[in-house]
Image (spheres, grey):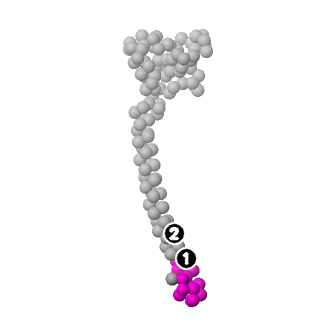
Amino acid sequence: MNADERGATDLAVADAARRLGVSEQAVLQQIKDYTLLAVKVDGTWRVTLPGQKASIPRWRRRPAGSIYAPAQLARVQDELLVFLVQQVEAVSREAGCLRAERDAAMAERDRLQDECRPWWRRLWER
């Protein structure tokens, strides 16, 4: 993608920093935090400033202010973690009940097998 294809709205990090009145590091941090729309082209970040129409192909964009922002992502992860912990606890309780039922069924099976054996085997095999 050359400069003509990118258009005037896609700025280098230094140009974006100058227009926003912040340092280049601040722009890079905003890209990292997903608060600026940016794409990496040939190893260089191209930034679309807020309020400008992006000429970056949609499939190459880093979504700005989306659920991918770190604070929002952490909140979603926490909610998912709580849900999964509840699911694991429910499955563990169910597994405990199923183990108890299995043990009772095995004991009943052993009792019935014992009743079906001839009297002399029951007497001598104890």
105 in magenta: no
Instruction: State the residue position of label 1.
Output: 109
Residue at (58% x, 10% y) in the render: 3
Give the structural element (helix, strand or loop) at label 2. helix
In the image, what residue type sits under mark 1?
Arg
Residue at (46% x, 19% y) in the render: 50
In the image, residue 101 lies at what x, y percent? Answer: 49, 69
Distance of label 1 from label 2 (alpha carbons): 10 Å
In the image, residue 69 lies at what x, y percent? Answer: 44, 30
Quadrant in the rendering for residue 92: bottom left
112 in magenta: yes
In the image, residue 89 lies at what x, y percent? Answer: 43, 55
Question: In the picture shown, does residue 101 fall above or below 114?
Answer: above
Instruction: State the residue position of label 2.
Output: 102
Look at the image and give the residue range highlighted in magenta: 108-125
Mark 1, Cα crowd under 10 Å, few <14 / some 14-19 / many 20+, is: few
